[in-house]
Amino acid sequence: MTLDGDIKRWAAGKEGNLRALLSTLQYVLWPECDWKPVPLTDLIIAASVKKVYRKATLILHPDKVQQKGATLHQKCIAEHVFELLKGAWNKFSSEELF
């Protein structure tokens, strides 16, 4: 399996859907990153989505991943997923009222 393939499968049909991406993040991240799965039902309120998004970006930010001594494979995953989440966040934040 390729890294791009794994990430594309994870994001398929969820592009731009921040809630769906966040609620399935555990399927694409590595166990050592300390991500705790978040049920979709916890992402109904916009403020909750913002909180979970912030937590995800703290874990996946390229500088943070680097500091934690991640492998090259993990850095690549983090970079791709970070960019997908950032794009979904931009769409989400332009549509939601906080």
Image (tube, grey):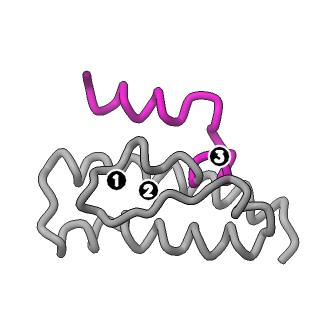
Residue behind mark 3: 20
Dot 2: few (<14), some (14–19), or many (≥20) neighbours within 10 Å? some
Mark closest to the chain's N terminus, 3 or 2: 3
Q: Earlier in the sequence, mark 3 or mark 1?
A: 3
Mark 3 element type:
helix
Residue of label 1: 79
User: Label 2 amino acid?
Assistant: Phe
Q: For residue 15: magenta?
A: yes
What residue is at 70 percent from the left and 63 percent from the top?
42
Task: Indicate which label's residue lies in the foreground, 3 or 1.
Answer: 3
Q: Quadrant of residue 3?
A: top left
Reading the image, the residue beneath label 2 is 82
**Element under disc 1:** helix
Give the residue at x 62% y 38%.
15
Q: Main secondary structure of the magenta part?
A: helix
Image quarter of the C terminus: bottom right
Q: Percent x, y for residue 18?
A: 65, 53
Instruction: State the residue in front, 97 or 28.
Output: 28
Residue pictured at 28% horizontal, 51% vertical: 30
Q: Is residue 36 above or below residue 72?
A: below
Amino acid type shown at disc 3:
Ala
Position of 41 relative to 4 (above/below) = below
Question: Does the CB distance between marks 3 and 1 fall below 8 Å?
Answer: no
CB under 8 Å between discs 2 and 1: yes
- Could you give the CA–CA distance between mark 2 and mark 1, rounded to whole angstroms? 5 Å
Q: Which residues are magenta?
A: 1-22
**Foreground residue, 55 or 75?**
55
User: What label sits on residue 55 in the rendered view?
Assistant: none
Q: Position of residue 36 (x, y in %)?
A: 44, 63
